[in-house]
Amino acid sequence: MTPHLQAILAIITQTGQEPKSFAQNFVQEMELGLAGCGSSLAMYPTFVTLPSGKEQGRYMAVDFGGTQVRVALFELFGQGKFKLLRQSRFQLNSPDKDYRLSHVTGDELFLRLAQEVKTLIRDETAEALGLTFSFPFRQSCLSEAYLTNWTKEIATSNTEGRDIAAMFRHSLNKIGLSIPLTAVINDTVATHLAGSYTDSSTIAGIILGTGHNGSYLEPYHPLTGSSMLVNLECGNFNLLRATPWDEQLDRDSEKPGQQKLEKMVSGCYLEELAVIVLKEWAKANESGLCEALGRRLPCAVMAQLITLPSKEVKKAADLLDDHCGWQGDEETVQGLVQVIQTLLNRSATLAAGTILGILQKQQPIVGQKVRIAVDGSLYRCMPGYAAYLQAILAQEIQQQGVALRTIDDASALGAAIAAAQNIRVV
Ligand code: BGC
């Protein structure tokens, strides 16, 4: 490895803060956010608590998390039992219309969602509908949700600042659907609820995918005096050390200054960050790779590259040729793989800090069985990522009984559970 590349990798690694000191700052920000004092953690009250286990009946769920939207029909039997009856998916960036862009309005977007609900439900009935909406929003009850700002580079117009629950209801009514929308929750909260429904030792929900966020249970929430899940919106945590390349990514993003932690951790931004770092290296390595890659290196390509054994440089080069038509030397390929791996390790180290902070805030009894529900493509699909994160946590926690757990269908199942919890309220 050249000294220049070595220096770049060292700078990245140094900004992957040691999880214990990260967690300390994180807990302080949690306290400040909860008290309503200035904090980079919004700590949104969610007006939903852990499931009682008695949630039963047929519920629709819409999972709106990014480019792919999923609509599902569940039967809940209570006590952690459920059946996914049927589901459909559609892409927001369909060839005829890209619903993520600012020339499309929120009203058009929710009408599209309502149409998908209508197609899936056919002529059956469901007790209620729940929406998992993976963006920051304010609530004063479970059935409303004022979008504060889009994240993850979605820019649909005339939506920020509005009650997206009311917009969705309006669209459902417009096409003759009378199903009540009783709950809007964040994806961390959905993951947390789905985790708790199936295992009561679940104390947090974590998302590591296109975005990054977490939720936990506040046993005596200052607003209500009773237990409530809190959506941290921790992608916006900003007590961080950043590299010049993180700063550049931030400056060039849709929302400079926002989502600083997310920009260092999540898949959506790692795709861009990898290219920015490569450009720095390209100052000394004129391989033409950056030009060929364009703005992003997709996570799916990164996953394939880091899985290949180091001897298989030729296969990695073929992969890049297939992806972007670049045909280059082995040294560049090896360097690229090292850049990707270093960024992924830093991401996992920072994510471990988030989890450690959430654990510290709740101080579980030593030896108690503790489960943290995790979802998201980075955690589930990036080779080695989950194992690396778990190894860091094991080093830091040294406490038996704490484990991360993934739950299938969590985002959609959580929406169905929340809808069931609120059925008599709306
Ligand atoms: C959003 C969060 C969401 C996270 C994971 C972030 O960009 O602000 O609300 O939970 O992504 O999807």
Image (spheres, rainbow, N blue to C red):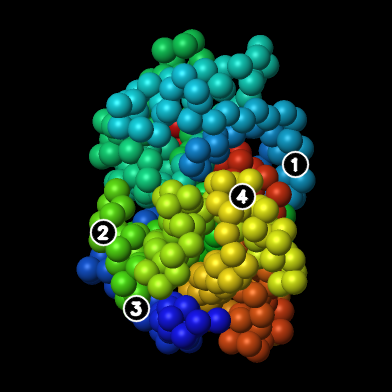
The residue beneath circle 4 is 321
Comparing labels 4 and 1, the label whose residue is closer to the camera: 4
Q: CA distance from mark 2 to mark 3?
A: 15 Å
Task: Point out the tag, 2 or 3, that comes first from the N-terminus.
Answer: 3
Identified at 50% across, 23% down, the residue is 95
Comparing labels 2 and 1, the label whose residue is closer to the camera: 2
Name the disc covering residue 82, or none. Answer: 1
Identified at 43% across, 49% down, the residue is 294
Identified at 31% across, 53% down, the residue is 253
Q: Amino acid at mark 3?
A: Arg
> Does the beta carbon at disc 3 come under 8 Å from ligand 1?
no
Q: CA distance from mark 4 to mark 2?
A: 30 Å
Identified at 48% across, 41% down, the residue is 66
Task: Point out the tag, 4 or 1, that comes first from the N-terminus.
Answer: 1
Local crowd at mark 2 within 10 Å, few (<14), some, or many (≥20)?
Answer: few
**Residue 257 in the image, given as x and y percentages of width and height:** 25, 61
Q: CA distance from mark 4 to mark 1?
A: 45 Å
Comparing labels 3 and 1, the label whose residue is closer to the camera: 3
- Judging depth in this view, the residue of 287 and 122 nearest the camera is 287
Q: CA distance from mark 3 to mark 1?
A: 44 Å
Q: Horizontally, is 368 left or right of 298 in the view?
A: right
Name the disc covering residue 319, or none. Answer: none
Q: Amino acid at mark 2?
A: Arg
Q: Are marks 3 and 1 in contact (CB under 8 Å)?
A: no
